[in-house]
Image: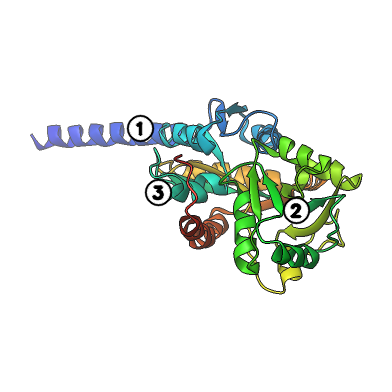
Amino acid sequence: MSAIVSRRAALGATIGGVALAWAGAARAAYPDRPIRWVVPYAAGGGTDVMARLIATEMSSRLAQPVVVENRPGAGTNIGTEAVARSAPDGYTVLSVDSAALVFNAALFRRLPFDPENDFRPVGMFARVPLVLAVGRGVPDRSLQDFVTRARAKPGQIDYASPGIGSPHHLVMELLQKITGIRLNHIPYRGTGPAMNDVVAGNVESVLVNYASSAEMFRTGQVRPLAIASGRRLASLPDVPTLTEALGEEMQTSNWQALVVPRAVPDDVAARLTAALLDTMRQPAMQARFREMGLDPAAGTPDEFERVLAADRRIWPPLIRTLGISMDG
C-alpha cells in the first residue's frame, strides 16, 4: 500500500512540476500577441503623435506590434474606462495625463473607474511645456507687464484655453490665485481655434502647448511671456519660467505617462517598463521629442507615483475651491 501511495505521490509531484514549468514558460513568453495602446484623445493630436512614435520603438523591443487605438471623449473618461475594465494581462495599455488621473476626480461627481486604485504605473515619457503668450498687438513685454495691466483692469483681459478643466485652464486659475489678478476665461474646443483668435487679435492671451504652436512663436504671431515648466525651453532661452518671473514657486502640471490595469502581474509590468524606458533613453527619440517642443522623460513607476502624489495635493483642492465642474 505504501508503495502505491509513494508512486502516486511521485506521479503527482511530476505532474505538478510539469504544470508549474508550463505555466512559467507561458508567462515567460509575454508578449506573444499584439499589444493595444489606447489613447483617450482623437488621432492627430500631440498625445496621439507621441504614442505612435513610442509604440513603433517599443514594438521592436517587445517583438510584437504595439497598435495605437484612439478612444476619445468625455474628457478622456471613455478611453480610460475601457482600459480600467480590460483584462489585466499586459495586452492593453493606456496613455494618461493629469486630466485622466488627477483633474477628473474633482471635475466629475462620479467616474466609471477609480483613478487612484484601478491603474498601475508603467512609466512617464514626456512633460509638455505650456507657454503663456499674448497676441502681437498686446503691449505686454513680460509677465510683470501682464500682471500689472491685469490688476489695473480686473476681469477685462481675456485669455483663451482649449477647454474648461484642461491643464491650460487650471494653470491660469492658479496664476490668478497666486498673483491676485482676475482674468476673463474664454474656453474653446481645442488649441487650434483658440490660437486663431489670439493671432487675429480677438483674444489677448493664451496658455498653449509650445509643441502645437512653435511656428507661431517663430514667426512672431504671438509673443511668449513665461514658461509653465520646471525649466526654460532651449527654443525660447530668453523666456523665464513662471517661477522665475513671479519670484515664488509655482508648480505646474502637464505630463504624459503609460499605465496598465492594477492587477497586471509584476513581471509583465516590468517588461513594459523596461521597453518604455529603453525607448525614451535613446538619443534619437529624445532629439525627436525636443524637435516637437516636448521635454522627453524616462520616468520610472516610482518617480511617476511621486509626481501623481504631488499633483493630487495641489489640483483637486483648487478645482473644488473654484467650483469648476464638467457635470454641467
Sequence order check, earlier mark of 2 and 3: 3
| Element type at mark 1 | helix
Question: Closer to the observer: label 2 or label 3?
Answer: 2
Q: CA distance from mark 1 to mark 2?
A: 59 Å
- Label 3 sits on a secondary structure element that is loop
**Residue 110: x, y in percent?**
38, 42
Q: Residue furthest bottom?
A: 247
Asked whether residue 95 appears in the rendered view, the answer is yes
Amino acid type assigned to the residue bearing label 1 in the image: Val
Task: Say which of 30 and 73 sits in front.
Answer: 73
Residue 122 numbered tag? none
**CA gap, disc 1 and disc 3:** 35 Å
Q: In the rendered image, which quarter contains the N terminus?
A: top left
**Is residue 63 positioned above or below 105 on the image?**
above
For residue 117, the mark is 3
- Tell me the residue at 82%/39% (across/down): 200
Which mark lies nearer to you, 1 or 2? 2
Q: What residue is disc 1 on?
A: 18
For label 2, count other residues whose C-alpha is less than 10 Å away and answer few (under 14), some (14-19) or many (20+).
many
Amino acid type, mark 2: Val
How far is the residue under mark 2 from the one under mark 3?
32 Å
Q: Nearer the viewer, mark 1 or mark 3?
A: 3
**Based on the displayed image, in which of its 4 quarters is residue 52 positioned?**
top right
Q: Amino acid at mark 3?
A: Asn
